[in-house]
Amino acid sequence: MKVKITLLTHGATAVFIVTYVSGRFKRLELKSGNMNKNQYKALMTVIPSTVEKTEKFQNNYEGRVSYEVLAEKSVSIFKDLMDKYSSWYEEQTEIKPKLDGISGKSMKTIIAHLRELSANDDEVIGVFNSILDNWQNLDDFYQNQRELRQINSNINIILNQLKNGKSDSKTQAKYLSDDFRSKL
């Protein structure tokens, strides 16, 4: 969590970003402005040691120091799905996947396609998770196509098989050959 602290008194124009990890003070970063030597020495008196103390400090230093809790950046859908894919691939093969530009481009294409089929990004994540969770339900050939470029190339087939079940090509071939023979 990050808190933006702006000093408002006695000629100070400094703006700081305070980073907290697990609720405890971790880092102080000067973003802009300046301070005199006395202000610099007293700086740590206006920095809360924990996030929970921010409101108390805000009330105590009202008008002299402003405290603004900054919104956390959410993990991008791309990074989230790449992390899930990496974990899944490593679990499946016991080998860490090689992720390069082609893998990244393939993931972006998969995300774009799933966005066309889904209502929102949460649904895209759900569909991608469903693909990975139900991988064992695909035909053997597609189960061995684990690289992102292969998944991207076969995404329509993968989605169709997961929706409608495996296609049993041997059974279909038998019916076709029986049908052909009966015509003779």
Image (spheres, helix red, strand yellow):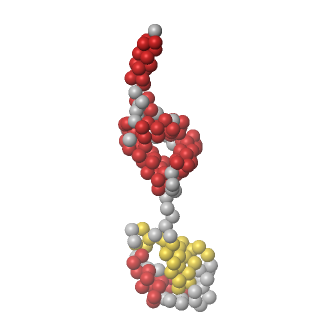
Q: In this view, does 86 lie above or below 59?
A: above
- What residue is shown at x 43% (from left), y 82% (from top)? 55
Q: Determine the residue located farthest toward the front in the rendered image.
A: 183
Q: Position of residue 4 (x, y in %)?
A: 53, 76
Tell me if residue 166 can be seen: yes
- What residue is shown at x 51% (from left), y 78% (from top)? 68
Q: How many marks?
A: 0
88 left or right of 156 in image: left
53 or 85: nearer the viewer: 85
Tell me if residue 41 can be seen: no
Q: Is residue 73 above or below residue 173?
A: below
- What residue is shown at x 51% (from left), y 38% (from top)? 156
Q: In this view, does 129 lie above or below 73?
A: above
58 left or right of 92 in image: right
Q: Position of residue 160 (x, y in %)?
A: 46, 38
- What residue is shown at x 41% (from left), y 43% (from top)? 132
Q: Where is residue 134 in the image (x, y as percent from the top left)?
A: 38, 41
172 or 82: nearer the viewer: 172
Q: Where is residue 67 in the image (x, y as percent from the top left)?
A: 51, 80
19 or 59: nearer the viewer: 59
